[in-house]
Image (tube, grey):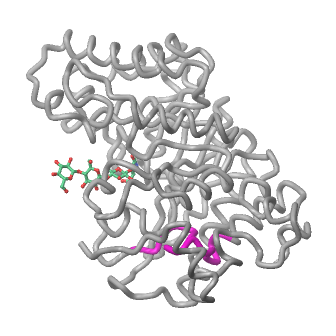
């Protein structure tokens, strides 16, 4: 994989002095001549004005471990941007099974704790991600040859321990992640929990999570469920059934991993609204918009405009559905995105360039948030 450049705060400051790429006006996000008191308002968080949580994934684990840059959370500029731009944090990988459970006996909470502490220091809420999933399970679990009873006990122990540790401090948990295929079939083969324990384990997982933290909102979360489709229909049917049985489900969220290769999901509002009509909260949890991009190439103006348009419309969708409580970006800047490692020939999916300057997509999100909060046109947001 190509070596990607990461700017430290010092590098940005030096570049600003030298008048090179990362200028003071962009480092990171301050207007060069913005009067004191206004610059700190020139963020996504301030533009949102409390009408919705605007979040980001906290980069770490997963694909980051294969890169030759330092841990993002050790970068001053990264921490500063994360602390000022958003009101909600999601653990990109740090609360997944393979991260928390290196072996059967050990729970490693170091990095998850760091996220919780960072959020507390910055007055941010946290989305917990995730408790029951087919991916990123440790090998000792997947290949452990456990009996059904042992697996049930393992999942309950995991939920009790992890959810219990952060009781009262997590705003929402992705209890169940990605259980349906695009055709709307339950993943009965590749999801160890569904395969070995049957679909009844889903209700148990929600009940155990509720018992471990009565205040957290409990979500089903998936990708490719932005619009009405076989997959989102499957969630609608399952959730309707589980709610009728009294299972404590509070929310349905769509991840929002979009690509300029595909049309914008026009019916996202209609889709989220039908879940809201079931009495649920909704959320957009992992928004990014990737585009065709050769390694080392720069996006065209037209690509950037289209990307900004997709970001703006996703933000407007989140804002227009009553009870859609958060919009989370799946990380920034581009250098930390999971996209190029997974989709060959695609990239530039986040709202910030690698030197933390803002892309048109950033302004599209900021403007849409400011419109909704009544802060549009405020001098702090003038550019
Ligand atoms: O586990 C394998 C390891 O066995 C192998 O040797 C190594 C070599 O490539 O890869 C390891 O897998 C990595 C995995 O994280 C586990 O560490 C993948 O390469 C890497 O791409 C993966 O990245 C994470 C991905 O979830 C895993 O599914 C990303 O950092 C993370 O951003 C991404 O986040 C997910 C959400 O949790 C759920 N929704 C989709 C979203 C994007 O995929």
Position of 188 with respect to 45 (left or right) is left
Residue 382: image quadrant is bottom right
Total tally of numbered discs in the picture: 0
**137 w.r.t. 107: above or below:** below
* Residue at 31% across, 78% down: 345
Q: Magenta segment: does it hold 358?
A: yes
Please tell me which residue lies in front, 216 or 264: 216
Please tell me which residue lies in front, 379 or 320: 379
The image position of residue 6, as x and y in percent, is 43, 70
Q: Magenta segment: does it hold 125?
A: no
Quadrant holding the N terminus: bottom left
Position of 373 with respect to 204 (left or right) is right
Quadrant holding the C terminus: bottom right
Residue range highlighted in magenta:
347-362
Position of 341 with respect to 354 (left or right) is left
**44 w.r.t. 299: above or below:** above
């Amino acid at each position: 994989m190509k070596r990607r450049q990461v700017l430290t705060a010092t590098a940005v400051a030096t570049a600003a002095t030298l008048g090179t790429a990362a200028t003071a006006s962009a480092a990171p996000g301050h207007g060069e001549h913005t009067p004191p008191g206004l610059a700190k308002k020139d963020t996504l968080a301030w533009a949102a004005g409390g009408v919705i949580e605007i979040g980001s994934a906290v980069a770490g684990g997963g694909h980051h471990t294969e890169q030759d840059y330092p841990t993002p959370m050790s970068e001053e500029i990264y921490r500063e941007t994360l602390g000022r731009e958003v009101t909600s944090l999601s653990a990109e990988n740090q609360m997944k099974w393979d991260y928390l459970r290196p072996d059967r006996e050990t729970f490693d909470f170091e990095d998850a704790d760091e996220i919780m502490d960072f959020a507390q220091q910055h007055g941010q809420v946290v989305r917990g991600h995730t408790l029951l999933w087919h991916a990123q399970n440790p090998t000792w679990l997947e290949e452990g040859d456990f009996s059904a009873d042992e697996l049930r006990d393992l999942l309950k122990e995991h939920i009790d321990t992890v959810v219990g540790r952060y009781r009262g401090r997590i705003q929402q948990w992705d209890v169940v992640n990605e259980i349906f295929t695009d055709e709307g079939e339950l993943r009965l083969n590749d999801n160890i929990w569904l395969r070995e324990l049957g679909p009844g384990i889903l209700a148990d997982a929600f009940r155990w999570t509720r018992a471990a933290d009565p205040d957290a909102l409990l979500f089903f979360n998936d990708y490719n469920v932005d619009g009405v489709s076989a997959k989102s229909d499957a969630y609608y049917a399952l959730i309707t059934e589980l709610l009728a049985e009294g299972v404590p489900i509070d929310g349905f969220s769509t991840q929002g991993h979009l690509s300029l290769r595909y049309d914008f999901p026009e019916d996202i509002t209609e889709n989220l609204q039908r879940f809201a009509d079931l009495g649920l909260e909704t959320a957009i949890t992992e928004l990014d918009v990737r585009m065709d991009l050769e390694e080392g190439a720069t996006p065209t103006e037209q690509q950037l405009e289209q990307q900004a348009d997709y970001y703006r419309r996703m933000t407007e969708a989140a804002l227009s559905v009553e009870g859609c409580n958060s919009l989370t970006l799946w990380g920034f800047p581009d250098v930390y995105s999971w996209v190029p490692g997974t989709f060959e020939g695609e990239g530039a999916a986040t709202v910030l360039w690698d030197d933390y300057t803002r892309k048109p997509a950033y302004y599209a999100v900021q403007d849409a948030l400011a419109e909704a909060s009544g802060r549009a046109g405020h001098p702090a947001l003038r550019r």
